[in-house]
Image (cartoon, rainbow, N blue to C red):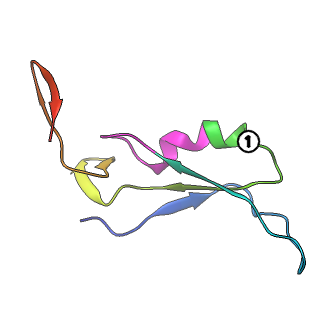
Amino acid sequence: MAELSYVTLNEPMRSVQQKSSVLMLLHGVGSNERNMLPLGNGADPRLGVISVRGPLTLGTNAYGWFQVSFAASGPHD
């Protein structure tokens, strides 16, 4: 398992009496936390944006949230 890694784009705006909103971005199988950054750049600037890397290392810069195998019939776990 890979160490938890994440990237933040915006710090949420908040005060003592105001709750913050956060958008958490999760990549797909074989991707990584940096691949989601363009989506986060388009988010409302009032949101905190966090993009998290899946814990399973599948290859170089390729991570996942669960084990999956690919066959001619498609993906299966």
Is 34 magenta? The answer is yes
Q: Quadrant of residue 55?
A: bottom left
The tally of labels here is 1
Residue range (magenta)? 27-38
Q: State whether residue 6 is above or below residue 65.
A: below
- Residue 41, given in percent of the width and then of the height, sits at 70, 41
- Residue 35, given in percent of the width and then of the height, sits at 49, 40
Q: Amino acid at mark 1?
A: Ala
- Residue 49, given in percent of the width and then of the height, sits at 66, 54
Which residue is drawn at the image coordinates 29% and 65% (left, top)?
2
Q: Pointer 1: residues within 10 angstroms few (<14), some, or many (20+)?
A: some
Which image quarter holds the N terminus? bottom left
Q: For this view, does 75 lie left or right of residue 14? A: left
Q: State whether residue 48 is above or below residue 39.
A: below
Which residue is drawn at the image coordinates 9% and 18% (left, top)?
72
Q: For this view, does 66 lie left or right of residue 10? A: left
Is 21 magenta? The answer is no
SS for dot 1: loop
- Residue 77, given in percent of the width and then of the height, sits at 14, 42
**Where does label 1 land, which residue?**
43
